[in-house]
Image (cartoon, rainbow, N blue to C red):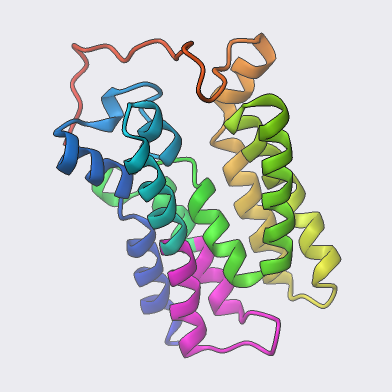
Amino acid sequence: MRLWLPILAIAYLLGSIPFGYLLVRIFRKQDIRATGSGNIGATNVARSGAKGLGVLTLLLDLLKGYAAVEIAAHFAPGTPGFPSDLAVAAGIAAVLGHVFPVWLGFKGGKGVATALGVFIAVAPLAALCAVGVFIVIFAITRYVSLASIMAAVMMPPFCLLWMPDRSPLFVGGIIFISLLVIAKHHANISRLMQGKESRFGSKKSLPPTDPNKQVRA
């Protein structure tokens, strides 16, 4: 148990690295929080006109979730095919780090890519099924938000299907991460219900961020 505190701290700090913010700041000299939705995630980075940086943000955010779990698994290996409780807890900490990063005043992204990295590490078959749901919903609707929400909704059932023997922490952790991702999309859900959500790649965009708004670096 004495490993838990340092491992969880490392996982949180790893998850809190705001790659979207850093990449746009370094390569475009802009604050991504002052663009579009103001989110630091891959979708908003891509919509800002930096599609390459958006892809890189997606990969790096995914990798930090995956790495957090693997670091914990190195110190506390689970049984074959099943992650240890510490590995699951590290995944939760990484997603919390992304959503509530200490470096940005605890205002981060929605956690989709980081959660996917965690899911790939702890439940790869279930994660693959969730990715399939995302692809189908996105292909039909072109709504990244709706596809992300539906993938998050289906992740717990897929885990229960593919991993019938699971610990309470595993079940609770998967449900918690999924609910957190869905909750972070509350504004998107409201716009979807009002028919005001932007489709990916469309010229319609979110209302511009107030240029006079002070954004903390």
Q: Residue at x 36, y 50 (%)?
A: 56
Answer whether residue 90 is magenta in the image: yes
Q: Residue at x 60, y 53 (%)?
A: 177
In the displayed structure image, the side of residue 60 where residue 75 appears, left or right: right
Where is residue 4, by image quadrant?
bottom left
Q: Is residue 107 visible?
A: no
Residue nearest the observer in this picture, 169 or 139: 139
Residue nearest the observer in this picture, 107 or 123: 123
Where is residue 116, by image quadrant?
bottom right
Q: Quadrant of the C terminus?
A: top left
Residue nearest the observer in this picture, 135 or 121: 135
Where is residue 211, by image quadrant?
top left
**Residue 203: x and y, percent?**
46, 12
In the displayed structure image, the side of residue 193 where residue 107 appears, left or right: left
- Start-end of magenta stretch: 64-92
Q: Is residue 88 visible?
A: yes
**Residue 204: x and y, percent?**
48, 11
Most prominent secondary structure in the magenta stretch? helix
